[in-house]
Image (cartoon, rainbow, N blue to C red):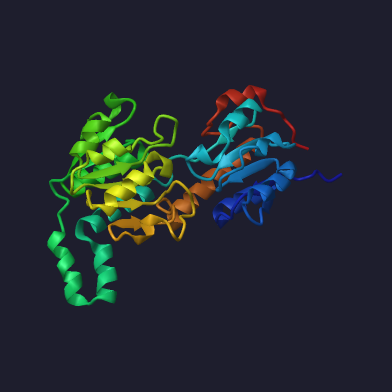
């Protein structure tokens, strides 16, 4: 008698290292697209779901036999966590594996903003050498400047290390526990961080407490030569207030990897500003980071299929209530 293999549904492709691990224990099914209707139609035939796209809020309310859900990455805002926890569906993630990648993106953006590199590149192609050189009249050095980091976790700590030890900057930090900051990061409140930083790095998770954290009032308090770099989530920033500040050139610039609505509309006001660097939610994506995320997610899938609790358990209170529904 042949034992039926469990099925793992992927919302999006991953890379070979993780897929090969999962294929040893399960049949892999790749959703043809990540639309809500597609995922709703396929969820009933999956034993584990691997998530790289936003799930519809009602997905787990549909008939399913899920043993667990694994986030291919760290942020679980893509997953309807309240529903999963209420229904006893374990959720795991893979935190920290792309921290170096994101931190390198942040510091690259800081250098581009400081020197106007992105503007020079565009200008030399369209207006010529001399006009591009004029941009350097407004360039600044990073040494001696202050970076303010909101969320001094895995990413924030690497950013702080690079900035203080590599560029000779000072670092301010804000998080829930200011007593748990590295020695080279001075803990301050948000008002102080926004008003005294030359570069504000948002690297916090999206929660009810952090939504709108970069508010209109805090953006208004920023120094004229200050900039915001957002690698958290779009709703952490009051996007309309930021657009206004950038349009009026009340602040130096911004680098945004995340937005209120994604993908970013082609007619969005940010598209027309030359003092903002726009990237398509890719700060954590490199070959190395994707391999680490893929392997980490795959190992969590294997644990769930074996009936073992995940290593990185987001809602551990579900474990004793989980439904063992493997065929």
Residue at the spot x=80%, y=43% of the render? 3
Question: Looking at the picture, how far across and down is residue 222, in whole percent?
Answer: 22, 41
Question: Looking at the picture, how far across and down is residue 313, in whole percent?
Answer: 54, 31
Give the farthest residue toward the bottom.
Answer: 128
The image quadrant that residue 282 belongs to is bottom left
Give the farthest residue toward the right.
Answer: 1
Question: Looking at the picture, how far across and down is residue 190, in whole percent?
Answer: 27, 32
Foreground residue among 209 and 30 = 209
**In this rendering, would 285 be left or right of 115?**
right
| Residue 16 seen by the camera | yes
The image quadrant that residue 327 belongs to is top right
Q: Quadrant of the N terminus?
A: top right
Foreground residue among 150 and 308 = 150
Residue at the spot x=27%, y=41% of the render? 219
| Residue 172 seen by the camera | no
Residue at the spot x=41%, y=35% of the render? 211
Question: Looking at the picture, how far across and down is residue 106, in whole percent?
Answer: 31, 50
The image quadrant that residue 235 belongs to is top left
In the depicted structure, whether residue 111 falls above or below residue 148: below
């Amino acid at each position: 008698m042949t034992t039926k293999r469990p099925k793992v549904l992927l919302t999006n492709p991953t890379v070979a290292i993780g897929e090969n691990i999962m294929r040893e224990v399960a049949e892999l099914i790749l959703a043809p697209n990540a639309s809500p209707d597609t995922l709703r139609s396929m969820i009933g035939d999956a034993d584990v779901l691997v998530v790289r796209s936003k799930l519809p809020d009602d997905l787990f309310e549909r008939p399913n036999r899920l043993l667990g859900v694994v986030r291919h990455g760290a942020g679980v805002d893509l997953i309807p966590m309240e529903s999963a926890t209420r229904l006893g569906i374990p959720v795991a993630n893979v935190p920290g594996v792309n921290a170096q990648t994101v931190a390198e993106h942040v510091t690259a953006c800081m250098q581009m903003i400081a020197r106007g590199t992105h503007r020079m590149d565009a200008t030399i192609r369209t207006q010529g050498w001399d006009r591009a050189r004029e941009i350097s009249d407004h360039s600044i050095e990073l040494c001696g400047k202050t970076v303010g980091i909101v969320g001094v976790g895995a990413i924030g700590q690497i950013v702080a290390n690079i900035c203080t030890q590599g560029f000779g900057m000072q670092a301010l930090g804000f998080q829930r526990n200011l007593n748990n900051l590295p020695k080279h990061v001075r803990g301050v409140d948000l008002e102080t961080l926004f008003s005294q930083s030359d570069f504000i790095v948002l690297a916090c998770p999206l929660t009810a407490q952090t939504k709108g954290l970069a508010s209109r009032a805090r953006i208004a308090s920023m120094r004229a030569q200050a900039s915001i770099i957002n690698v958290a989530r779009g709703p952490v920033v009051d996007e309309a207030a930021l657009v206004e500040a950038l349009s009026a050139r009340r602040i130096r610039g911004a680098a945004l990897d995340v937005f209120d609505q994604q993908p970013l509309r082609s007619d969005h006001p940010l598209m027309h500003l030359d003092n903002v660097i726009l990237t398509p939610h890719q700060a954590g994506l490199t070959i190395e980071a994707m391999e680490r995320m893929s392997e980490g997610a795959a190992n969590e899938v294997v644990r769930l299929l074996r009936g073992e609790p995940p290593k990185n358990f987001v809602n551990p209170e579900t474990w004793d209530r989980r439904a063992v529904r493997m065929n």
